[in-house]
Image (cartoon, helix red, strand yellow):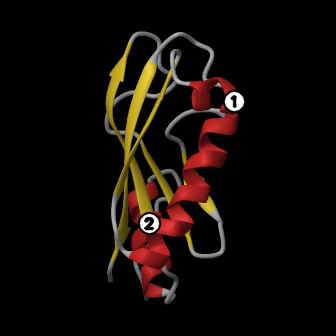
Amino acid sequence: MGQAVNVLDPLDIAEAWLKEGRRVAIATVIETWGSAPRPVGSHLVIDGDGNFQGSVSGGCVEGAVITEATDVIASGAAKILEFGVADETAWRVGLSCGGRIRILVERVNG
């Protein structure tokens, strides 16, 4: 009998998805400044089909992270993404809370 997956822990989900043969990336909040929707250490796991679990921010920022994660899965090259109030991209994707976040996106090899 297999071990149950904690559906609230993105890292457990990443491990389960890898065992299923999915290609997986993990996004991790590595730095925040000011008001930020999620604290440092928050995770979002993404598979090659764009399925995801967890959270690194809210709304449209996560959409941008998921898009970048599919590129990271394909290339294997990790990326650091930054979204902030002064960043035109952040306004476009909706981080209007006045803070700044940096997110590491890396492919996980099983």
Give the foreground label among 2 and 1.
1
Q: Amino acid at mark 2?
A: Ala
User: Could you tell me if the residues under marks 2 and 1 are in contact, i.e. CB atoms within 8 Å?
Assistant: no
Residue at 51 percent across and 16 percent down: it is: 86
Numbered badge on residue 92: 1
Determine whether 4 is above or below 35 in the image.
Answer: below
Residue 41 appears in the figure? yes
Disc 2 to disc 1, C-alpha distance: 24 Å
Residue at 66 percent across and 74 percent down: it is: 49
The x, y position of residue 37, in whole percent, is 52, 23
Residue at 62 percent across and 32 percent down: it is: 58
The x, y position of residue 27, in whole percent, is 42, 52
* Horizontal side of residue 93 vs 77, given as left or right: right
Snapshot quadrant of residue 67: bottom right
* Horizontal side of residue 100 vs 109, given as left or right: right
Numbered badge on residue 64: none
Q: Nearer the viewer, residue 3 or 108?
A: 108
Snapshot quadrant of residue 70: bottom right
Determine whether 85 is above or below 27 in the image.
Answer: above
Residue at 49 percent across and 39 percent down: it is: 56
The x, y position of residue 79, in whole percent, is 37, 55
Q: Quadrant of the N terminus?
A: bottom left
Determine whether 104 is above or below 7 in the image.
Answer: above
Snapshot quadrant of residue 50: bottom right
Q: Amino acid at mark 1?
A: Arg
Q: Residue furthest front?
A: 88
Secondary structure beneath dot 2 equals strand
Secondary structure beneath dot 1 equals helix
Residue at the disc numbered 2 = 25
Mark found first going from the N terminus, 2 or 1: 2
Q: Quadrant of the C terminus?
A: bottom left
Q: Nearer the viewer, residue 41 or 82?
A: 82
